[in-house]
Image (cartoon, rainbow, N blue to C red):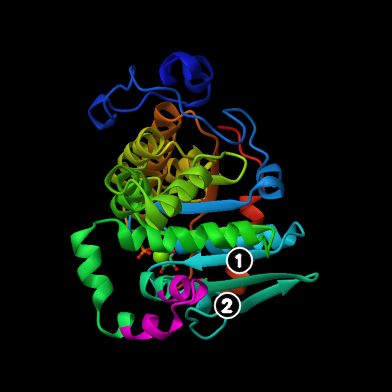
Amino acid sequence: MTVRADVDADVDAAAGPPSTPAASPAPRATIASLRTACLRKGIVDPRQFLASCRLVIVAGKGGVGKTTVTATIARAAVACGRSVLIAEVEGKSGLASMFGQPPFGYGEVTLFEQGGCPILARTITPDHALAEYLDDHGLRRISGRLIRSGALDVVATAAPGIDDILVLGKVKQLERLRATDVLLLDAPAAGHAITFLTAARGLLDAVRVGPINAQARDVIELLTDPARCQVVLVSLPEETPVNELVDTAYALEDKVGVALGPVVVNGVLPAVPGLDSAIAGAGTTGPAVEAAEFRRARLALQHEQIARLADALPLPQIHLPQLFTSAIGLAELELLADAFTTPVHT
Ligand SMILES: Nc1ncnc2c1ncn2[C@@H]1O[C@H](COP(=O)(O)OP(=O)(O)OP(=O)(O)O)[C@@H](O)[C@H]1O
Ligand SMILES: [Mg+2]
C-alpha cells in the first residue's frame, strides 16, 4: 500500500488550501507506507505518546529547534510523571542553559526535577563510548592510551560508521538499563542523522563476525522496534525545512526501518485575531500597515507549508509556537511543553 493511497482522503480534507505545485516534493507513489508507532492522522494525543515512548530520537535540519524540542519533550514528560535521560551527541547544544544549569559532559547530571521525576542529561562521544566499552571488557589499561593516541580517528577513517556505532551502542546500553522511563537522543542535523542511523546496517554488511557485528545487530534490533524506539522529526513552517523533513522521513523509513512518531512543527507564529479587518480599516500606508501586511503574508506562507507537510507525510503534527524571546529558559520551556501536550487536528 502506498502513502498516497493510504491517506489521501483524510489528508486532503485536513490540509486546507492546495499548495503551490512548484513547491511540492516529488510524488512518492511507489514508496512503501510509513509505519508509525503512534496515531496516524486525526486528533493527536501527545500525552499518549509521552506515556508510552521509551527511546525518542529527535532529528531535523540544522537550526530548526531539535535541542529545544528535546528539552520540551523532556519537560512535558516529567510533567506527566515520567523520568527522562537526555543524551546529546554533538556537545555545545545549549541544553544545559535552557534549564539554567552549567554545561555538562560525559557524566550524568540532573537538569531539572518535578514530583520526584528528574531530567538527567549527558553527552555521548565515540571516544568515551569506546573507552567505556574497553573498560567493561577488561581492557582498562589500554583504553586511555588508545583514546589519547587518536587511534579511533584512524579506525573511523578506515571503517566509516564505526564512531556512530560506538555512540549508538552506548544508547542501546542505556535503553536496556532503563534507569529512566524515557531516553531522549538529541540527534545530529538531518543529513548526518541519516548516516548516523544507517551506520549499523553498513557495518553489518562490512563486518560479518565479532563484537562490532554483534553491536550493529543489537542497534538495528533497537532502532527497528517501534515499541522501543521512535524518531520525532522537527521542522519550521518554511519550504526548505519541510522539504528536508519529508526526504528525511522517507530515507529513515527506507534505509533504517525506524518508526516515526509525530512530527513537530516548531516556530509557528500565532494567528492575530482581527488582523484582516484591522488592515482593511486602516486605509492608509505606514509602518503599522506594512507590519500587519508582513505578518499576514508570513501567516499565509506558514499555513501553506503546514498543509504541504500534512499532504506529503501521513504523520500527526504537533505545533510549537514561535516565542518572542532572546533565549529559551525554564519559563519558555514550560510554555512549549504545554503547547506540546495540546492535541492538534492535522
Ligand atoms: N519555538 C521557539 N521560539 C523561539 N526561539 C526558538 C524556538 N525554538 C528554537 N528557538 C531558538 O532557535 C535557535 C535554534 O534552536 P536549537 O538550538 O534548538 O536548534 P537545533 O536544531 O538544535 O540547532 P543545531 O542544528 O545547531 O543543533 C536557538 O537560539 C533557540 O533558542
Ligand atoms: Mg541542537
Which segment did they paint magenta?
Answer: 131-145
Question: Mark 1 CB in 8 Å range of ligand 2?
Answer: no
Residue 150 in sight in this render: yes
Q: Residues within 10 Å of mark 2 (few under 14, many from 20)?
A: some
Q: Amino acid at mark 1?
A: Leu
Location of residue 62 in the rendering, given as x and y in whole percent from the top left corner: 33, 58
Q: Residue at point 41% right, 57% down?
A: 211
Q: Which residue is mark 1?
A: 85
151 up-or-down from 56: above or below = below
- Give the Cα distance between marks 2 and 1: 9 Å
Q: How far across and how far down the image is residue 276, in percent? A: 46, 40
Which is nearer the N-term, disc 2 or disc 1?
1
Residue 267: percent from left, percent from top: 46, 54
- Find out whether the residues at labels 2 and 1 contact each other: C-beta distance under 8 Å: yes
Callout 1: helix, strand or loop? strand
Q: Quadrant of residue 338?
A: bottom right
Q: Nearer the viewer, residue 272 or 277?
A: 272
Q: In front: 173, or 326? A: 173
Q: Position of residue 121 (x, y in %)?
A: 56, 72
- In the rendered image, the vertical position of residue 127 relative to residue 309, given as above or below: below
Q: Which residue is mark 2?
A: 108
